[in-house]
Amino acid sequence: MKKIARYSLAFLFCLLLLAPIFSLSASTSGTLAEDQEGLADIGRAFGENGEPRDVRLIAVQIINVVLTVLALIFVVLFIFGGFKWMTAAGNDDQIGKAKKTLVAAVIGLVIVIAAWGISRFIICKVLDASQGGYTCSAL
């Protein structure tokens, strides 16, 4: 049973990592001319009017992506702990392990949410101080 749980967790983790690749590959049009017309989408890192985007905003997006991935990992860990508890069949050792997994997942999720809130607060204050009158609704 442990092997099945490990393999299924590894499969879900790999699927989570490969999901953006599948969505990008599904968006290709097929012909070379149409794909080259889509090169403007790649240039979105330089903004809509061709000017470079602010490095601070790119850093904010990277932080948001990292914290989102971490939150998803802890949610999957939480689901895995619940699955372990449900399949324990009254075995106290397995229930104890499942409880430890659930507690660790909840603690990790709380830490990630707190990190997101703190980083958002600090970034908003830094951008407001450096640009003056900046609103955090764009983040």
Image: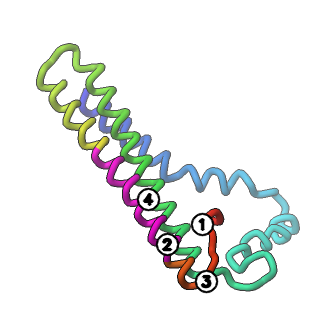
The residues tagged by marks 1 and 4 sit, at their Cα atoms, a distance apart of: 12 Å
Q: Which residues make up the magenta segment?
A: 107-125
Q: Is residue 105 left or right of residue 70?
A: left
The answer to whether the residues at label 1 and label 4 have Cβ atoms under 8 Å apart is no
Q: Is residue 119 magenta?
A: yes
The answer to whether the residues at label 1 and label 2 have Cβ atoms under 8 Å apart is yes
Single out the residue that lies furthest toward the top: 90
Q: Where residue 128 sits: x, y (%)?
A: 56, 77
Residue plotted at (71% across, 80% down): 46
| Residue holding disc 1 | 136
Q: Residues within 10 Å of mark 3 (few under 14, many from 20)?
A: few
| Residue holding disc 4 | 117
The answer to whether the residues at label 4 and label 2 have Cβ atoms under 8 Å apart is no
> In terms of image quadrants, where is residue 75?
top left
Residue plotted at (69% across, 84% down): 52
First in sequence, mark 3 or 4: give its number.
4
> Amino acid type of disc 1?
Cys
Q: Where residue 21 sits: x, y (%)?
A: 59, 56
Camera-side residue of 93 and 113: 113
First in sequence, mark 1 or 2: give its number.
2
> In terms of image quadrants, where is residue 94?
top left
First in sequence, mark 3 or 2: give its number.
2
| Residue holding disc 2 | 123
First in sequence, mark 4 or 2: give its number.
4
| Residue holding disc 3 | 131
> In terms of image quadrants, where is residue 131?
bottom right
Single out the residue that lies furthest toward the front: 133
